[in-house]
Image: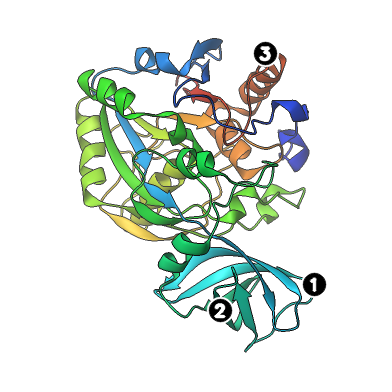
Amino acid sequence: MTRPLTLADFDYELPEELIAQTPPATRGASRLLHLDGAGRLHDRQFAQLGGLLRAGDLLVFNDTRVIKARLTGQKATGGKVEVLVERITEPDRALAHVRASKSPGPGTALRLAGAFDATVLGREGELFDLRFPAPVLELLERHGATPLPPYIAHAPDEQDVARYQTVYAREPGAVAAPTAGLHFDQAMLAALAQQGVARAFVTLHVGAGTFQPVRVQKLDEHVMHAEWYTVPAETVAAVARARAAGGRVIAVGTTSVRALESAAAQAADTQAAPAPGAAAGEPGARVLAGPAQGDTRLFITPGYRWRVVDALLTNFHLPQSTLLMLVSALAGVEPIRRAYAHAVAQRYRFFSYGDAMFIEPPAQ
């Protein structure tokens, strides 16, 4: 009998100097670790990605746009506060993380960026419900700072404003970048299109919860943070075309994975079960039945039944994180463990500004 997986199965040692603090000099000037379907590892350059793709494949990108979600200020008492907007709920209202020496209660005015007051309306769990005096997005763009991940030590600068954003970002709402997409520039996108590789978009507004560690040993006890996603009709049609042409659906980043698989799970409630043993892309498999949107708390761990995604382009993920569990669900726990040990030994750069990985799951 196979023992249940625990948090310890997703740990690894990472030298601090391998955590990338800045992006490469130009987009795409990264390394690419290829884990193929036979479990073999290949050291490549990101510029070689096209050689791993074929005409008829579909790349699915997350077009969310990172907002300048971080604000600093003070309470009327003079106490310092730090605000990280997590989700805009109305034009002038948002849920936010608030860090202060004493938790602000309802009615408290927070003077932010020395420019305006936001009022605490109440709480929803760990988040504070804040009312802003003008549209939230406008105030953040004018006064906020790019919310770099906690493992990046420097304060955000103009380089971060440009590079902690994909070249195709268009739907504002994320507080963390869909980092696999940071490698692409317009020239590579054009070259892949010329090659016959199609592309489509989903939106998933990445929340700060993506950096939260799993705090329970038994994975089935972990509660995922919620993130808003949209899979439009155009993407549903693109997936259908790729399937019909025998192409693969390749997610660019774990956020694209979660959007696609969440849409399939939502559709599954109204569809008949697939034929026994059917995999994504086979007759009888559950695929995208139509457009979908909503909050997702989908937690993908080893043993997950894949419904849409055939392969994944992703960055390297934190030890004991839900994202490391997701890639292990696609490739297998042991292949990912070997890949990460190899990446450490070969001095790959890790996390948001780091190198990439192209993962093909084991051949069925």
Label located before the other in sequence (2 or 3): 2
> Up-down: is 175 above or below 8?
below
Residue 31, given in percent of the width and then of the height, sits at 53, 18
| Badge 1 amino acid | Ser
Q: Is disc 2 in contact with disc 3, using a CB cutoff of under 8 Å?
A: no
Label located before the other in sequence (3 or 1): 1
Residue 114, given in percent of the width and then of the height, sits at 60, 72
Q: Residue at x 40, y 37 (%)?
A: 276
- Give the Cα separation between the discs numbered 2 and 1: 18 Å
| Badge 2 amino acid | Ala
Q: To which residue does mark 2 refer? A: 118
**Category of crowding for the residue at label 2, using alpha-carbon neighbours closer than 10 angstroms: few (below 14), some (14–19), many (at least 20):** many
Residue 3, given in percent of the width and then of the height, sits at 74, 36
**Category of crowding for the residue at label 1, using alpha-carbon neighbours closer than 10 angstroms: few (below 14), some (14–19), many (at least 20):** few
Q: Tally the marks.
A: 3
Residue 62, given in percent of the width and then of the height, sits at 39, 44
Q: Secondary structure at mark 3?
A: loop
Relative side of 203 to 326, left or right: left
Determine which of the numbered discs, if any, sits on residue 346 in the image. Answer: 3
Mark whose residue sits in front, 3 or 1: 1
* Quadrant hosting residue 306: top left
| Badge 3 amino acid | Gln
> Up-down: is 198 above or below 345?
below
Quadrant into which the C terminus falls: top left
Q: Residue at x 47, y 80 (%)?
A: 133
Determine which of the numbered discs, if any, sits on residue 60 in the image. Answer: none
- Give the Cα separation between the discs numbered 3 and 1: 43 Å
**In terms of depth relative to the viewer, which is nearer, 165 or 232?**
165
**In terms of depth relative to the viewer, which is nearer, 205 or 281?**
205
Residue 287 visible in rendering: no
Q: To which residue does mark 1 refer? A: 101
Q: Is disc 3 in contact with disc 1, using a CB cutoff of under 8 Å?
A: no
